[in-house]
Amino acid sequence: MDQSVAIQETLGRGENCIIAVQCDVLLDNVTESRLLGLVESTKEQAIFIYTHRRMAITADDVSLEDIIPISLDFAVVEVSSPEELAVVGGDTRVRISYQEEELELRLPFGSHSRLFLSEVNRAWSDVCKSPTEVPKFEWIKKYHKAARGHEVVRQALAPLGTTLTKISQHRKTEKSSDKKGTLEKEKGSNSSTEKSTAYSSPESQGTSSREDRDDLVRSSSHTPSNKAQILAMPQFGLRDNLIRCELLKNEDLYTYLQDFSVFLGTYNVNGQTPKESLRPWLSCTLDPPDMYCVGFQELDLSKEAFFFNDTPRELEWTKAVSEALHPDAKYALVKLVRLVGIMLIFFVKKEHAEFISDVEAETVGTGIMGRMGNKGAVAIRFRFHNSDICVVNSHLAAHIEEYERRNQDYKDICSRLQFRQLDPTQPALTIMKHDVILWIGDLNYRISDLDVDSVKELISKKDFETLHNYDQLKRQIDEEAVFAGFVEGEIDFQPTYKYDAGSDKWDTSEKCRVPAWCDRILWRGKNIKQQHYQSHMALKTSDHKPVSSLLSTGIKRVNSDAYKKTFEEIVRNIDKMENECIPSVTLDKREFHFKDVKYMQHQAETLSLFNDGQVPCQFEFIQKPNEPTYCKPWLTANPPKGFIAQGGKVDIELEVFVNRSTAPDLNSGKEQIEDILVLHLERGKDYFISVTGNYLPSCYGTSIHSLCQMREPIQDMPQEILREPAEMSGNENAANTEKPLDIPKELWMMVDHLFRNAIKQEDIFQQPGLRSEFADIRDCLDTGMPDSLPGSNHSVAEALLLFLDALPEPVVPFSFYQQCLENCSNASQCEKVISMLPQCHQNVFNYLAAFLRELLKNSASNRLDVNILATIFASLLLRSPTKQDLAEKRKTQEFFQHFLTQGSA
């Protein structure tokens, strides 16, 4: 649970809670729980200390007790003993010093505590780097005043230093007789039994304290002094991973299952505002669920939402959900995530909030070029007690015939949606790496091979079993094309799409859509039982009906005594085998060759590692000298690091993928498919792995100038010829015996195909094509075979966009980008800028603009308008040399619109 949200609500304007952590304040044998927040304002930072009620959800749950400014009078050191450090899983004890006061804290084991300490150390290091710039902390003075209604703090605050003074007075009372000895002991921390460092205030040391303070910065980081500590440190990770692996294997010894109810709901609202209570949907259960995961699709269909991901609907529907939750329980909003019109909201009963942790949210678009967020998924992952749960809300490709595109969307979501972990040493988590996966959404699978009358007849008979046999999703699951390992409950309700809005009547529009179960709920995991699966006909706002499912889910809870016993046994066993042997592995092969690598075509080979040593080992691919990463940018090893138990085996996928950033140098021959990987074993030796291959040059990633010099397909050109145009691309006056083409022939082939076949195609440039068809189109362009382009119109349209996106120098070269921004509101100046482009670039720009104007003449059929085309093409033709902000994005669109609304480009 991100408790920084509660702290943020107590802060003033311009103040930001960077990170929060729950901890214990240590006072003799008494511990008191507190919430710490690292707060930043005007480039100054301070630690805010709060008392709190259980898990902090809102400002009502916390009360500010103290503030510790991070200044030259501040220090933080770890005071855990070597015995504590040697045990991974033990809490971390730290001492915070401010002026003459000290505060000792115990932070829970885990990556979040380490992240908090690293942020504090970073803030402190920044202060120490500029000792002459004394922070004033004017912004914290207001917190000394009494409460002011509903503003920053809701009660009168104790004077600054209360907590520190309380601790310090206790220490003085207890240790006044040996104060001098204690200070000497702390100063000699490197050789003492405590890993600690005392801090003396600058008033007593003068300017010479800078060196001591730098030492404190260094000593406060993890600096191990013996082998046991080295193995315990997170940056080395071997002992940590050993224990984690053994705990996972022995999880049954210290966990037990407890059932919790999870309410899942999905609703495609067709861009409507909430017009009726959602209680018939969200409060349909007798007992209040323990959790709610509520997903929406098509939250907002406006262009503002599509282009700029901004919509008032988010707040409106969130409020409607909050008001419709079960009235017999109180719920806390844990997380909300939205991508254009796809939104997922996660609520939990307040009494369960303290057991929620590691909350992360991610999004992935699967629209045109795999970027646009009109289709795609949003997801939230979290840990509840000892179970990892992932909830996905997706909106897949539309239209009855596009089931293969829906399959591809599902696979893209599974591969591209990854959650970062708080521990940066750990690899990202994919959807499938969770104990429980809950998948909801408008999956858009339709009913095939039945006409609309036959479907409606089966519905009228309530013969849903027969009708379900014609369901595309059921068929694709049966063929193991998608959702492998997932379960869907029995469907005994009528299709949820498509209705006339405001009624229960099937679609009476001209298209007369065949009814379908577009809106679905599936799950994957053990110990899950479905209590209900139903639609809710009472809600009539949309052309879809909402769907809900209630799952009784077995969650792993930890038995503290059994955990402690298991943990101690694992540590004892690891202690016995440590240092007995040097790790070693056997590699099944050390040379890999990738044949005929193509642009955006994934290839993979498997490297198998077998641990033939006497101890578990940890491996990692490491950087070679003077190289920024462990491999070339077109190569990845998955996983790049890992852990192998004794006698165990790990398969590593060596993957080659050439994209727009790596293609130019490979096309021109400046780079080759060649690399050496260094596989390093922790406390062991290094292994060297050779990777070679041959790359087939492509028009994708080749410059406009170079392509205009080639009258033959690029793969028919000798390598030395390919290198020459690339070297001459910046020289318009270079000698050339043959007149160059006006525009690249590959560009002409795609535009000509679309002009002849897709000028009236509905949703052209808005609906993605198929990846398999793109591969065929690319091969046709690169080899000249066959003469005409294969694939659907949508696939050719996406191939054109990918071609423009892959150009090393965009149609409007980077050097003209700033001029375009400066002149975006003046049509004649825009035309003047284009007239200054290199001739081949100018030709391409005018050719594309003329084609797009032809498309707009048929907008009644293809549903395109100036805004849509400007949004799609401006970012490709006028790419920014750096990351483009929203203001620049609007200006490039305004610039390009002049050429779509006027015929004088």
Image (cartoon, helix red, strand yellow):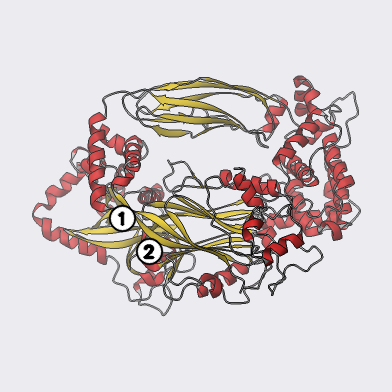
Whole-number angstrom distance, CA of label 2 to CA of label 1:
40 Å
Which quadrant of the view contains residue 318? bottom right
Relative to 163, 593 lies left or right: right
Single out the residue that lies furthest toward the bottom.
Answer: 149
Q: Residue at x 61, y 77 (%)?
A: 276
* Residue pictured at 84% horizontal, 28% vertical: 710
Q: Amino acid at mark 2?
A: His
The crowd level at tag 2 (other Cα within 10 Å; few <14, some 14-19, many 20+) is some
Residue 219, picture quadrant: top left
Please tell me the numbered disc located at residue 73.
1
Place of residue 616 in the rendered image (x, y in percent of width and height, measured from the top left): 34, 30
Q: Which residue is mark 2?
A: 352
* Residue 809 seen anywhere in this rendered image of the structure: no
Q: Earlier in the sequence, mark 2 or mark 1?
A: 1
- State the SS at label 2: helix
Foreground: 498 or 564?
Answer: 498
Query: Which residue is pictured at 72% across the width and 64% down the height?
Result: 456
Where is 711 relative to 502, above or below?
above
Query: Would residue 772 appear left or right of 321 to someone viewing this image?
Result: right
Give coordinates of residue 28: x percent, y percent: 16, 58
- Give percent across and percent down for residue 890: 72, 58
- In the image, is 615 to the left or to the right of 459? left
Q: Position of residue 262 (x, y in %)?
A: 46, 62
User: Which quadrant does the N terminus fall into?
Assistant: bottom left
Q: Which is more toward the observer, 557 or 899?
A: 557
